[in-house]
Image (cartoon, helix red, strand yellow):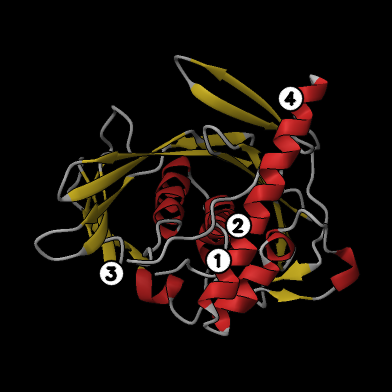
Amino acid sequence: MFNLPKSQLQLFGESAYCVASSDVLENCWKAETPLSRFTSVVSWSISTTRPAAFGAAPYNPVLGETHHVSRGNLHFLLEQVSHHPPVSALHATDDAETVEMVWCHQPVPRFYGASVETEVHGKRELRLLRLRETYVMNCPKLLIRLFPLPGIDWSGPSSSSTVLYEIYGHWDRTVTIKDVNNGKTTEIYNARNVISRLKAPIIRDRKGILPTESAAVWSEVTEAILRKDWERAGEEKRAVEEKQRALQKQRESSGENWVPKHFNLSYNKEDGWHCSPLHNTVSPAPIEVPV
């Protein structure tokens, strides 16, 4: 039946901070030439594309839900900045002030009978601060096939109009890149090295966990799922959802507009949703991913 025992906001964050090696990201600012940095960013972008669990949906994040995690000296803060439509924002910075990530993420599912295609609106920015370079990329579409054989894959273009390289391979295996000028081919991504041996986040400071943290919001539901107590899990899930509906009614009755705590949120028809962090840096988190 039931849900994957974690929030979609957590899964969104995991695509950025759960890597087996930090080299994939470090290569982006350590590479010496603009072209080598470009290919490193492509490799890193592919590494954020992860397998999705089939047949088990994560929790829909509640409005204002947060997820604060550190991996080494890189710190991530996510917030559910809109509920209808669902929009998630991510901000990450490191202690050495070499890199910054700002992502805005709005999944839009479309049903086609035998399949479901989820187009992810919003931009992903990777900023190499010391080099004053910003790379802007989109996210491929998630395709869920229902018939004849169930399966999940990523589809759609994710590149600019100027062709410098041709890319071949599979996001869950290896990817090679071919220079269109000289024909040279190089492997830039190996999924086994990046997404195998992943380590789960660990709570280092329980007192530092905010009430809005995903793990806190859904703790009772998750515990019931892990015990396979499906009736209890359903009850706890409904309790979370009913609390959110009550808060929404309270805001409507008082004429209060909900405002994100960590991001400025804006929208226009041309660019869609834009999430701008309110603070320049992200602080170390009470939840850590072992390096």
Residue at 45% from the left image edge and 53% from the top image edge: 40
- Number of residues whose C-alpha sits closer than 10 Å to that of mark 2, classed few (under 14), some (14–19) or many (20 or more): few
Distance, label 1 to label 2, CA atoms, is: 6 Å
Camera-side residue of 266 and 240: 240
**Disc 1 on helix, strand or loop?**
helix
Q: Which residue is mark 1?
A: 234
Residue type indicated by callout 3? Arg
- Number of residues whose C-alpha sits closer than 10 Å to that of mark 1, classed few (under 14), some (14–19) or many (20 or more): some
Q: Earlier in the sequence, mark 3 or mark 4?
A: 3
Q: Earlier in the sequence, mark 2 or mark 4?
A: 2
Camera-side residue of 123 and 61: 61
- Number of residues whose C-alpha sits closer than 10 Å to that of mark 4, classed few (under 14), some (14–19) or many (20 or more): few
Residue type indicated by callout 4? Glu
Mark 2 vs mark 3, foreground winner is 2
Q: Position of residue 95 (x, y in %)?
A: 79, 56
- Number of residues whose C-alpha sits closer than 10 Å to that of mark 3, classed few (under 14), some (14–19) or many (20 or more): few
Q: Which residue is mark 4?
A: 252
Quarter of the figure with residue 219 = bottom right
Distance, label 3 to label 4, CA atoms, is: 49 Å
Whether residue 78 appears in this view of the structure is: no
**Tag of residue 173:** 3
Q: Earlier in the sequence, mark 2 or mark 3?
A: 3
Q: Are marks 1 and 4 in contact (CB under 8 Å)?
A: no
Q: Which residue is mark 2?
A: 238
Residue at 85% from the left image edge and 72% from the top image edge: 206
Q: Position of residue 165 (x, y in %)?
A: 26, 43
Residue at 60% from the left image edge and 61% from the top image edge: 237
Mark 1 vs mark 3, foreground winner is 1
